[in-house]
Image (cartoon, rainbow, N blue to C red):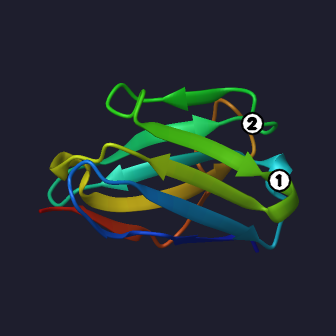
Amino acid sequence: QVQLVESGGGLVQPGGSLRLSCVLSGGILEKYWMGWHRQAPGENRDLVASISWSGNTPHYEDFAQGRFTISRDNAKNTVYLQMDLLKPEDTAIYYCAARLTNPGAYEYWGQGTQVTVSA
């Protein structure tokens, strides 16, 4: 059974940085196309960024482009989201997700990690 566990969230001031990690267990990371999503209170869960099996093809939503960096270390079964120049509107629960095919639906989700950007 594939499981995803996120970590690295917390409270940060505007303009600050956080690095989120997502560890996949019960499977082999290189088989999965990975994505980071986020959900703010009262909002839908939205894609933030995704990355291909090899890591050569990252994709970013417009709000993340230039500020966030998605990467993966298949040897460590870990995906990362480096977030810089954080804004209060980035406050949300961030979720890691995995899917076998692209395109396709994300099949596995982590429990999420809270990111709060506030002075």
Number of disc labels: 2
- In the image, is residue 13 above or below residue 103? below
Label 1 SS:
helix
Q: Residue 52 carries which label?
A: none
- In the image, is residue 87 above or below residue 114? above
Q: Which of 8 and 17 is in front in this view?
A: 17
Q: Residues within 10 Å of mark 1 (few under 14, many from 20)?
A: some
Answer yes or no: do the residues labelled 1 and 2 have beta carbons within 8 Å? Answer: yes
- Percent position (x, y) of residue 71? 65, 44
**Res. 102 image quadrant:** top right
- In the image, is residue 13 above or below residue 113? above
Q: Which of 99 and 87 is in front in this view?
A: 87
* Residue, disc 2: 55
* Residue, disc 1: 74
Q: How far apart are marks 1 and 2 (CA)?
A: 9 Å
Position of residue 26 in the picture relative to residue 114 (left or right): right
Q: How crowded is mark 2: few (under 14 residues within 10 Å), some or many (20 or more)?
A: some
Position of residue 3 in the picture relative to residue 19 (left or right): right
Amino acid at dot 2: Gly
Residue drawn 41% across the image and 70% down it: 113
Q: Can you say which quadrant of the picture contains the N terminus?
A: bottom right
Position of residue 19 in the picture relative to residue 28 (left or right): left
Residue drawn 54% across the image and 58% down it: 96
